[in-house]
Amino acid sequence: MNSTLMTLWSPKSTSQAAVFIPDGPELTYGQLQEQIEAVRAALLEGGVQTGDPVGIVLPNNLEYLVAFLAATWARAIAAPLNPNYKVEEFRFYLEDAGARAVVVGPGDHPAREAARQLQIPIWECALDAQDRVYVRRQSGQAAPNLDRSTPTPSDVALFLHTSGTTSRPKGVPLTHGNLMASIANIAATYQLTPRDRSMIVMPLFHVHGLIGATLSTLHTGGAVVVPGKFSAGAFWPLASRYGVTWYSAVPTIHQILLGRADQDNAPHGGLRFIRSCSAALAPAVFQHMEERFGAPVLEAYGMTEASHQMASNPLPPGPRKPGSVGKGTGVDIVILDEQGQVLPAGRQGEVSIRGANVMHGYLNNAEANAACFCNGYFRTGDQGILDENGYLMLTGRIKELINRGGEKISPLEVDAALLEHPAVAEAVSFAAPDVKYGEEVHAAVVLKATATPAEIQAHCLKRLADFKVPKVIHITQSVPRTATGKIQRRHVAAHFLKGE
């Protein structure tokens, strides 16, 4: 039991504050456990079986937290999805996960339509008149699941997709043991205690928000403040009202808060630390944040396949190195060359990891597993250098993902949507530098009929979540190729961005 998610709410002091929903419910650990138990019982009575993947399509709210923890306690597999996906995206992810149920909020939603098309049972999740979370099966019938056994560390608890350089995103199954190892590493790194309160500004369908900020806090008996969405104007008033001691976010959010700190009367102290992860934090932003907010800024390094955190800069008095993501946090980090040999300090190669938090392999993807695992290490696809003190500097990505404010976007997925337009003959998407998001999606398009960039973007909006749609479309007569006729995205990017 000590290596499953059940430890997140029990044993804890039942009167200790656990969850604050601004302008909504406030729960103690005892109340949280009661609601999780009720939803777990409803799922089992409704026929959710051990090992069933359950799609969860909910925003940041109490319903999400209770549904997620209840599903994992029922020995099902929680499969959260971005609520902003379109019908076609939900269809793909639900089908690929093998979802046997979909949990959604009230009202029409693309996830409902996708579930209907796939004939997957739909469960509605909301708050009743007493602000208690309920789930209600709305389609199909099934015999109750009579198995009331509790999870084991080897049970898969969480299933997520991670975009790759192929058109097919890879499925990542993470066990209770994987998640608890990562949660314990994070709690130890930041010395979290029951006195800590974390503001959750990242989406709970990502490991950053879910593991890095929420479950790590609950693991140590602290409390989480969960607004429905990030609002820069509401951030500091909420932090003051609830006594927030730390938060974790992507650099984009840090920059927004920093840019309007004075107009928002942001305090010059009060936070125990600020964590940054999921994209590179510019050293200048690091310095300005520490000066303005009067708190140590700790840059970390995470990825889905590692149940989030792999490395972090330490709390004071440990040295914080701008431009570095710090040392391994309960994770063995090495730099491998192309042959899989460990390189010495100061040599650039592929960042590779080993630890109890690392997934055991992608789902049904033997080719990817063979490529990513080497001599017991998982190859991250990132290039980096370890210095003589064990601090990791990331120098680039081997993979061609577009990292838009922490959202990892597969360029081939964008290419495929572009190529569905009847006027598009050829399309290559790529990352372009962006002040706000770090990287933005651009695309080079060769036409075979008349079409404007705006028309092509409108076409993509019907097929892709908004953040994946190219911000700029470069209409061109041809796309640069290598001497052997291959397209390399970095060369395409260099060609079309050279004048910007």
Image: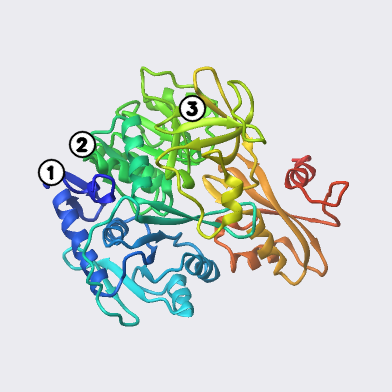
Marks 1/3: CA distance?
Answer: 37 Å
Residue at image position (47%, 68%) is 94
Looking at the picture, does residue 346 appear above or below residue 408?
above
The part of the image, by quadrant, that contains residue 228 is bottom left
Quarter of the figure that contains the C terminus: top right
User: Which residue, given by chain and number where applicable, does mark 1 sit on?
Assistant: 13
- Nearest-to-viewer mark from 1 and 3: 1
Instruction: Pinpoint residue 138: horizontal percent, then vertical percent.
Output: 32, 79
Numbered disc 3: secondary structure: helix
Q: Is residue 445 left or right of residue 80?
A: right
Mark 1 surroundings: few (<14), some (14-19) or many (≥20) residues within 10 A:
some
Q: Which residue is found at the position 42% from the left and 74% from the top? A: 112
Callout 2 crowding tier (Cα within 10 Å): few <14, some 14–19, many ≥20: some
Image spot of residue 472 (x, y percent): 69, 53
Of all residues, the one furthest to the front in this rendering is 375
Q: Which of 316 and 161 is in front in this view?
A: 161
Q: Quadrant of residue 192?
A: top left
Comes first in the chain, label 1 or label 2? 1
Q: N-terminal of the two: label 2 or label 3?
A: 2
Looking at this view, is 53 or 281 the one in front? 53
The amino acid type found where label 2 is placed reads Pro
